[in-house]
Image: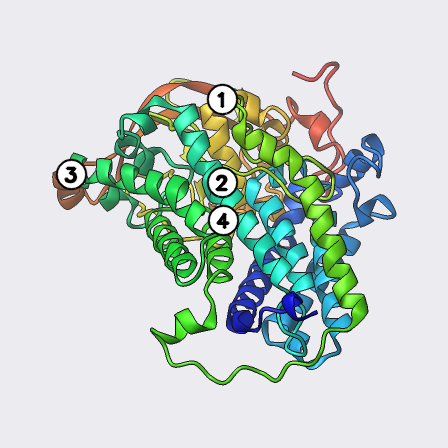
């Protein structure tokens, strides 16, 4: 079928697949490095407890068949190795069916992690990576031309990401409508980057330009993705430019890089050759019938599943970052439907003093990405995902977001749990665990230019209230009754 192939997108396919493989690699690395403290057998939200309560049909995962920390580590490192191989081009040096199997394995392994990750994996970019990775499997490899239907499905995905984000902003917060949200966003976003302080101090008219440009790129430009070339490529270039702006102004894990990968899939070779010299395209073979059948079946599946996200787009009660099926296919996306006006941060402290008093000396724990020490410059961590830091930001918004995991986190600090401490930047008690830990809620604000020059402080903060009163190991013993860091402690009569 001549209409089936889109050879002019050979470069777009190559770039898209390499970027998706790179993001899979980062996702699996993140899982391997953090899972023991978060969802391991003795983690804050253990997978064994989750799979005992949630059936396989409700959350499909290989870990319903068997779970151990060793098995999870094997899955994570296997996914990392396979993603690295695909990134290096392994998929183009094997038969078409094997290349598709590579992508299928990556998708199954990462789906298995996400579906048992609970709160730690409740982010829209997890579903986006799974959906984009699933489509990547049907793009084929260098042996066949990219299927035109899959290229259109990628545009539909990019449209939902951008247009959905644009609509949720207009519907969700008045500051997007009056173009004032960027006065607050750079300061209150989940994890500011090293340039966020400077973005925050841009003149107010430029913040309005930022907001207006965002509306244009997310509400007008996505429609142009479906227009003929080179208009579609120009629209994609505008999306890429906006995403690079977001990358420099904050840390949003791999969301922006995923969006860039989708945008680059829209750019055809003739449009790209007008700007850059390109190598000759590979010599394509005829598509096997089974491949054409699979692509047609995929297209029908996506069209059917698109009913729910399409209805969500036109709904006045639009949902943000919603999966309508357990396989995270054809989802609804969006970001920052509301913008916080204040930055409230939870600061965790400990003391070695067994008896508390007015003169008790408390020492802060430092986090790798989220603001804690006022003089520490915000770090660039994306596309790596610091899951604990992100959840700490949500905890500052409301204790409800921390209900399931915060007490277990504090309990692990009271025993100097090594895998939990690996998630932190600084442990003030390297030799012996603290006798008490507590959490305080602070209002953080970026300092002024003068304060930064004279004090070196990026943040100023004011105590708002106590978030968690001082607790001891005995108070939280029921959460660490079986832990190698300390002998078991007899649990109290009732949990606090």
Q: CA distance from mark 2 to mark 3?
A: 29 Å
Image location of residue 290, percent across then percent down: 81, 67
Question: Residue under circle 3?
Answer: 203
Q: Is residue 432 visible?
A: no
Residue 488 quadrant:
top right
**Residue at position x 76%, y 25% in the image:** 490
Question: In this picture, is 360 found above or below 130?
Answer: above
- Mark 2 or 4: in front is 4
Question: Residue 471 at what x, y percent from top left?
Answer: 56, 23
Image disc number at residue 389: 2
> Circle 2 — which element?
helix
The Cα–Cα distance between marks 2 and 4, rounded to whole angstroms, is: 16 Å
Q: Quadrant of residue 53?
A: top right
Sequence-earlier tag: 2 or 4:
4
Task: Say which of 279 and 271 sits in front.
Answer: 271
Mark 4–mark 1 contact, CB under 8 Å? no
Tell me what residue is drawn at x 72 percent, y 71 percent.
99
């Amino acid at each position: 079928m001549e209409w089936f192939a889109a050879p002019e997108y050979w470069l777009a396919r190559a770039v898209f697949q390499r970027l998706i493989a790179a993001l899979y690699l980062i996702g699996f690395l993140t899982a391997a490095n953090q899972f023991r403290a978060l969802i391991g057998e003795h983690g804050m939200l253990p997978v064994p407890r989750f799979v005992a309560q949630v059936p396989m049909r409700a959350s499909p995962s290989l870990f319903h068949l068997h779970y151990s920390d060793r098995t999870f580590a094997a899955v994570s490192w296997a996914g990392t190795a396979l993603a690295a191989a695909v990134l290096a081009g392994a998929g183009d040096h094997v038969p078409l069916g094997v290349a598709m199997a590579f992508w299928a394995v990556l998708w199954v392994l990462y789906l298995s992690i996400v579906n048992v990750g609970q709160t730690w994996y409740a982010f829209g970019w997890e579903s986006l990576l799974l959906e984009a990775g699933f489509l990547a499997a049907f793009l084929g490899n260098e042996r066949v031309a990219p299927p035109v239907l899959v290229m259109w499905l990628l545009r539909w995905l990019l449209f939902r990401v951008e247009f959905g984000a644009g609509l949720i902003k207009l519907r969700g917060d008045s500051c997007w409508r009056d173009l004032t949200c960027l006065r607050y966003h750079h300061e209150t976003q989940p994890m500011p980057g090293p340039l966020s302080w400077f973005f925050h101090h841009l003149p107010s008219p430029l913040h309005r330009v930022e907001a207006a440009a965002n509306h244009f790129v997310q509400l007008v430009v996505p429609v142009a993705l479906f227009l003929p070339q080179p208009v579609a490529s120009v629209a994609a270039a505008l999306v890429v430019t906006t995403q690079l702006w977001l990358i420099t102004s904050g840390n949003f894990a791999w969301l922006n890089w995923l969006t860039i990968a989708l945008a680059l899939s829209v750019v055809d070779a003739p449009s790209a050759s007008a700007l850059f010299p390109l190598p000759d395209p590979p010599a394509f073979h005829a598509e096997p019938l089974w491949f054409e059948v699979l692509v047609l079946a995929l297209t029908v599946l996506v069209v059917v599943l698109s009913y729910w996200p399409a209805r969500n787009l036109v709904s006045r009660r639009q949902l943000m970052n919603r999966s309508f099926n357990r396989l995270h296919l054809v989802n609804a996306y969006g970001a920052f439907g509301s913008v916080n006006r204040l930055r409230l941060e939870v600061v965790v402290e400990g003391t070695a003093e067994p008896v508390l008093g007015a003169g008790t000396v408390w020492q802060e724990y430092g986090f790798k990405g989220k603001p804690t020490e006022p003089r520490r410059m915000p770090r660039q961590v994306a596309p790596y995902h610091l899951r604990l830091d992100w959840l700490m930001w949500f905890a500052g918004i409301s204790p409800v977001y921390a209900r399931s995991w915060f007490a277990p986190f504090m309990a692990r600090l009271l025993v100097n749990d090594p895998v939990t401490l690996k998630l932190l930047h600084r442990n003030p008690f390297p030799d012996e665990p603290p006798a008490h830990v507590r959490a305080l809620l602070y209002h953080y604000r970026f300092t002024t230019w003068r304060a930064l020059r004279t004090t070196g402080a990026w943040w100023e903060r004011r105590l708002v209230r106590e978030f968690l009163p001082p607790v001891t190991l005995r108070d939280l013993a029921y959460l660490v009754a079986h832990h190698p860091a300390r002998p078991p402690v007899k649990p109290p009569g009732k949990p606090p």
